[in-house]
Image: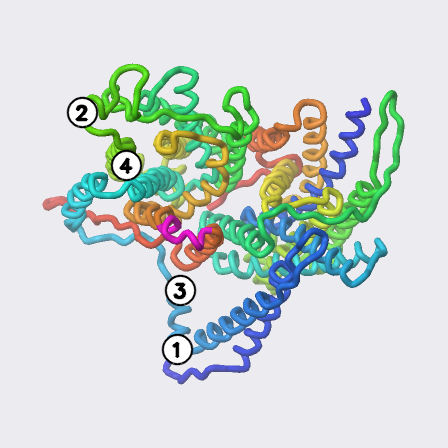
Amino acid sequence: MSQAVGINFKKSSVDAFIAGLMALVLFGPIVGVVLDGYGFNAEFGRVAWIVAVVAVGRFVMSSFLQTEKGIALAFRYANSDDGVTVLPPGHKSKMIWIIPLVIAVGLLIPFIASKYVLTVIILGLIYVLLGLGLNIVVGLAGLLDLGFVGFYAIGAYGLALGYENLGLGFWSMLPIAAILAAFAGAILGFPVLRMHGDYLAIVTLGFGEIIRLILTNWASFTHGPNGVSAPLPTFFGLEFKRRSRDGETFHEFFNIPYDSAYKYMFIYIVLFAVVWAVLFIKHRLVKMPIGRAWEALREDEIACRSLGLNHVLVKLSAFMIGASTGGLAGVFFATYQGFVNPSSFTFFESALILAIVVLGGMGSTLGVVIAAFCLTVLPEMLREFAEYRVLMFGILMVVMMIWKPRGIVRVTRTGFSPKKGVVK
Amino acid sequence: MDIVLQQLVNGLTLGSVYGLIAIGYTMVYGIIGMINFAHGDVYMVSAYITAIAIAILTFFGIESFPIIIVGTLFLTVAVTGAYGWVIERIAYRPLRSSSRLAVLISAIGMSLILQNYVQLSQGANQQGVPTLLTGAIRFSVGDGFVQITYMKLFILFVSLLGMGVLTYVIQKTKLGRMCRATQQDRKMASILGIDTDKVISTVFVIGAVMAALAGVLVTLDYGAFDFYVGFIIGIKAFTAAVLGGIGSLPGAMLGGLILGLSEALFAGLISSDYKDVFSFSLLVLILIIRPSGLLGKPEVEKV
């Protein structure tokens, strides 16, 4: 390709004109004519702006793709390999220095951060947990789960209703909720996982909605849309309240003045420990035969089945582990809010968790942690753009799938070298 | 007895609407094997365009019912068809060679974009359209009576007409032959000189047009809608498509009718709070018992 490439401006203009016309047809009615009762208010200025932006953008893009750089870019895009980066054998990860540092900083945070910052970080960590759970299902096993919020709801309502009906507290519900959610995952997954992967997406979507509808409509048990209050965690039986009906409270026992931030500090520390435990377990699982089987099934199901892998059991294990992580996150969410109601568990939550996994990179742990904080902490800071949040998530999903289907942080894997003395 | 008959009438119209939307799911699945998650939101967009078209037509002083209805149908079908084409062009065509998971996620992203974009430009409030067609036929049955509004008859008429025209196009015309050839074997069809990208675009436009018909009919009958209506009706239409056998055109229509009838009977006789739960449970049950649906062929996975 040594010949000089000229830009055909006529072609670019035609492209721009078509794009502008299309934008006029699409955005004209919806953006330009705002319904007001049975009449309407005309807002043609907005339409003109959008059409102009689309036409100019298309013109620039069309011209750029005709230059040498543009052709090279298009070529690279068409031939981008989206595999896993394999590091040379014997590669030492820098994580061995970073992880203790992060743990140390993380443990300092509750003592220096303000109460508001702490609550935002707790929310971020809850989404890290959710993202890690969904990442096992979507990222590692390649099963699209759109009802992940259902397991989250099971965990949250498990704590609230378990406390109300059975008197179970935070610590006993933490494992029980994980088991409950895993059990629900097994009941849902076992029949569906035998079939084609696409159906799973829609069945799980239906499952998430069923859970929400039941929580809303079964008022005698779940109190319907009014919600249920959830208990706080206890510190070896000491409560984080100003006054306790039975026994001492945390601040009385340690003879310190009451501060409502103590409960958040405690939730943070417990959550921090749980997130690290999940990270550790996930890290190990990926290297175990079961983790390898997940990824192999994701890449080529037919090959795996012909090699004798039981695809239903392998998928089910990923589905259940993911679900139980969602259940854990639900317990933390309920105790952090002190209250749960069905409006916290809409399809939007599922989409947000999916956006975390997609942005972070499917199968990548570090990416998911970063993405979870980006997508939950950033909207807290940019309150004035709150209404554009869902739009951004949508655009993010489409653009990431076209541009970088493996996410921002690519999965790396250390290669193997044969041991000395092995016959090649 | 009168309740059962009344719910049968309601279920028949509901089912024909589900059938119309299910056509979009089933044709797209048949041709490129993806679940078009944004299809329910295309329906939602068409509901808004219906109201906008009626508002514009009445603004220009047009009062007669036939002109309004024809004008609304024409505008809605044209604009919604354009939406179908653009969605395929932007979100799905660049992913033609990617994994199925990537296409699905892109479709969910598209669905979120449509919902939020309509919400941002039109506001989150519920919107409505004026009642254009009033009056009903009444039969007395035993102690009570069964009422069939003219609107319901109109829905049945238009949806049957739409399905009839589509069946004719797919079975008898050159375009239909190209669609069927691409559905059977995309690579072979393109070797034989069919522009498969164009055929896929056409299928998306056909799906959007059918959804637009449903959008006009439901909006005129029901009167109220918001930016979230596409979600539930989309899942139900997908259930109808799976029930009839995904990929099969008559299956989508049959599945729509069966789902509409059974849902209306469930709502009338057992509980209307749980009618959505009923539909979702039906979907799960069909997938477990007979994933290929009533008229579909079992899917064989090959290397």
Colouring chosen for the image of the structure: rainbow
The residue shown at (23%, 39%) is: A110
Q: Nearer the viewer, residue A15 or B190?
A: A15
Q: Does the CB distance between marks 3 and 4 fall below 8 Å?
A: no
Asked if the stretch drawn in magenta spans residue B141, the answer is no
Q: Does the CB distance between marks 4 and 1 fall below 8 Å?
A: no
Q: Nearer the viewer, residue A364 or A338?
A: A338
Residue A260 shows in this picture:
yes
Task: Classify residue B284 as left or right of residue A416.
Answer: right
Label 4 vs label 2: CA separation?
31 Å
Label 3 environment density (alpha carbons within 10 Å; few <14, some 14–19, many ≥20): few
Which of the two marks, 3 or 4, is nearer to us in this view? 4
User: Hey, which residue is sitting farthest left in the picture?
Assistant: A421
Task: Classify residue A141 as left or right of residue A9.
Answer: left
The residue shown at (37%, 46%) is: A376
The quarter of the picture where the N terminus of chain A appears is: bottom left
SS at mark 4 in the image = helix
In the rendered image, which residue does mark 1 sit on? A68
The image quarter in which residue B70 lies: bottom right
Amino acid type shown at disc 1: Glu
The region drawn magenta spans A378-386
Q: Nearer the viewer, residue A251 or A205?
A: A251
Amino acid type shown at disc 2: Asn
Label 1 environment density (alpha carbons within 10 Å; few <14, some 14–19, many ≥20): some
In the rendered image, which residue does mark 2 sit on? A255
The residue shown at (42%, 78%) is: A67
Label 1 vs label 2: CA separation?
73 Å
In the rendered image, which residue does mark 3 sit on? A77
